């Protein structure tokens, strides 16, 4: 609103001013911005797709590693059971005088090595499980 006098001594007149701004050639100004935004979105979509593929590959590798570790642990447990049985039989044979001390000690060493391998295999299963959980995004 404005109060003006058309000339000196005339009474004040109240008028309302209305300004209207019409943007001409807005497309010419916005097209480069829109093209840049579209290119940025396409790049982000491609990065997301690559990240998803990489994540799926990591999950598949971790699952394979876990399956292999579980298989190795099962074989180590079977080896340990056989080594224990062998060690018990050879200890009995030694007590009866049928075998010598080095044979008995070899059996005990084999049992000890089998126990150590079984523990390592169980640790490997735990590590493979942790790697799979990490690939899946599961927090500990």
Image (tube, rainbow, N blue to C red):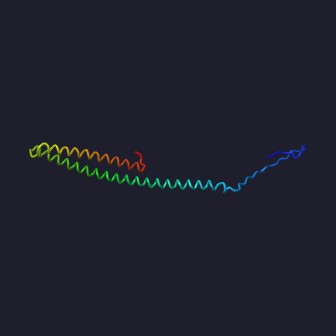
Coordinates of residue 85 in the picture (x, y in percent): 18, 48
Coordinates of residue 10 in the picture (x, y in percent): 90, 45
119 vs 27, left or right, is left
- What residue is shown at x 9% (from left), y 46% (from top)? 98
- Quadrant (top left/top right/bottom left/bottom right) for the C terminus: top left
The total of numbered circles placed on residues is: 0
Q: Nearer the viewer, residue 85 or 31?
A: 31
Coordinates of residue 33 in the picture (x, y in percent): 62, 53
Q: Nearer the viewer, residue 110 or 71?
A: 110
- What residue is shown at x 40% (from left), y 53% (from top)? 59
Coordinates of residue 104 in the picture (x, y in percent): 15, 44
Q: Residue furthest right?
A: 9
Q: Nearer the viewer, residue 104 or 46?
A: 46
- What residue is shown at x 38% (from left), y 48% (from top)? 131
Q: Nearer the viewer, residue 97 or 102?
A: 102
């Amino acid at each position: 609103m404005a109060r003006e006098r058309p000339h000196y001594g005339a009474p004040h007149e109240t008028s309302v001013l209305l300004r209207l701004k019409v943007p001409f050639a807005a497309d010419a100004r916005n097209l480069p911005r829109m093209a840049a935004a579209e290119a940025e979105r396409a790049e982000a979509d491609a990065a997301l797709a690559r990240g998803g593929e990489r994540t799926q590959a990591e999950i598949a590798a971790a699952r394979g590693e876990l399956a292999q570790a579980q298989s190795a642990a099962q074989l180590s447990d079977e080896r340990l059971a056989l080594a224990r049985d062998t060690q018990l039989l050879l200890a009995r044979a030694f007590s009866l005088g049928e075998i010598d001390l080095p044979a008995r000690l070899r059996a005990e060493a084999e049992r000890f090595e089998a126990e150590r391998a079984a523990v390592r295999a169980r640790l490997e299963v735990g590590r493979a499980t942790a790697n799979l959980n990490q690939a899946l995004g599961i927090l500990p």
